[in-house]
Image (spheres, rainbow, N blue to C red):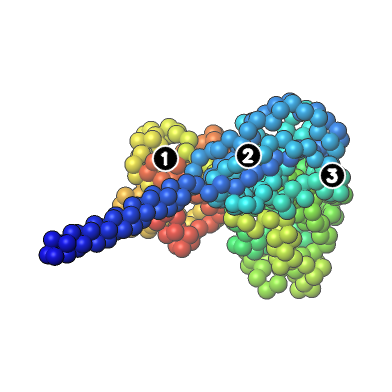
Amino acid sequence: MRRKATRLLLSVGWSRAGQLLAVLVSAAVAAVLLANLLLTPVHGSVLVLLSARSADRVHGFTVEIHASRGAWTTLGRVAAQDVPAAPQTAQAIQASVPAGEYDAVRVEESSTPARLQIQRSILTTILIAVSDGGPASNGVYAGGQAVSLGLNELAGQLRPIPEFSLVDQFGRSFTKQNLAGRPAVIAAFHTRCRTTCPLYTGLFMQLQRKLPAGVLLIEATVAPQEDSPEVLRAYAGRVGASWIFLTGSIAEMESFWAPFTVELSSGQLHSSMLAIVDDHGYIRTVWQGVPDVGGDFAPELIPDLNPDGLRQLASHGSQWGVPQVLDSLQAVGGLRSPSTAGEGRAADFNLDTLDGRQVRLSNFRGRPVLINFWATYCVPCRTEMPLIERMASAHPKLVVLLVDELDDRGAARQFVSQLGVTSIVLFDGDGRLGDLYGIIGLPTTLFVHGDGTIEGRYIGQTNEAILRTHVAAIGG
């Protein structure tokens, strides 16, 4: 009897042990399956469409997208095929890619900033405009809303600005390609105008404080016979304007202004106009007349106004100003934070200091670097530099390189001596380094990680909060 009971207990014990083992094995299998599920990236689908202004045939090219926190992913290669006129489209590629945020599209060797949120079970579309057998310049539209816009533009519903070739206040070439991927606010301007032009400059000062760096502010002259690059540069420095000023020959400026129906100046008389151009080069909104700059007009511009200009200032102009411009930019996607995917690694350089010593950027690899482009004729630069000096003193790891742009070496020496500057001052008298870094206004500050990649840039006069945020981001 005792033996039977023992065998029964053993039998029950093994049965329970088997059950327990089965449960453990099932749990282990479930854990492995769950781990594999968690480790397997979620994917979404991307559809690449082609369209053109008029029926075309395209040769093959590769399309890639860039992850906001990663690398480039190839969607595939577009085969040679016929492309219909908008609003009709041809399907070129459908690809499965990891879900997440993407910030640029690359077609062949040309990269365009974009905002793509790829999600599981949702088809994301990209439209590529075709022209003359290949991808059109600045012809990438990413996301459903942008694709709809692109088809409207290609179908002739919106007016594009033509190709142009002008120069900025530094004498650097500025073409339609410089607008690619960036919305722009463009105003007619004349340095000798004493009525409406100072009000437009005042409006730009207000806008610059509210706009992301991805929006270009451009004042283009209507008096090219007077507004040379040197005159524009001196004006920008005097009033503290750190945006783009454009000029060219009389014929070039007439051609540039033609789609805006703006005529060149005749003395003090000229067209007063501000336009929003989207990031594909199409004119979206145009305002005529005098902007309302409210009660926030820059006092340094008051002396530039004649009695008629002062009356215009007091009248609140044509009842449009910053709020209306911001609304228009919002409608074309211009208030999104800009992508920095195109910045990449800071280009290495070797430049002389004011006393003739050579400094190479790569010698500071491993340390955070602040590069500030400035000039003696730039009023905001004089205001900003002591703040940068204090930031350098508070962050011993931070390397500060102050690059004097297109200036006089003697004036620069006197300038830094008067301010007691102790940071490294470099002299870029011919502007080659500014060209390399695409400097479009002064001051401009770049922030570089220790590994040599650019964290970001700020165009215009910084403040303590701006500097502190960027310096913290690069580990200063």
How far apart, in angstroms, are the residues tagged by discs 1 and 3?
A: 44 Å
Under mark 2, the amino acid is Ala
Label 1 vs 3, first from the N-terminus: 3
Nearest-to-viewer mark from 1 and 3: 3
Nearer the observer, disc 2 or disc 1?
2
Q: Quote the CA–CA distance across marks 2 and 1.
A: 33 Å
Q: Which residue is mark 1?
A: 452
Check the image and report above or below for 250 versus 184: above
Q: Residue 229 vs residue 365: left or right?
A: right
Q: Which residue is mark 2?
A: 95
- Residue placed furthest toward the left: 2
* Label drawn at residue 306: none
Residue found at x 57% / y 42%: 97
Label 2, residues with CA under 10 Å away: few <14, some 14-19, many ≥20: some
> Which quarter of the figure is the N terminus placed in?
bottom left
Question: Which amino acid is tagged 1?
Answer: Gly
Q: Secondary structure at mark 3?
A: loop
Which residue type does callout 3 highlight? Pro
Relative depth, front residue between 218 and 202: 218
- Find numbered disc 1 in the image and state the secondary structure of the residue it sits on: loop
Tag shown at residue 87: 3
**In-image side of 74 versus 451 (left or right):** right
Kindly state the secondary structure of the residue where label 2 is placed. strand
Residue 72 position in % (x across, y down)? 54, 38
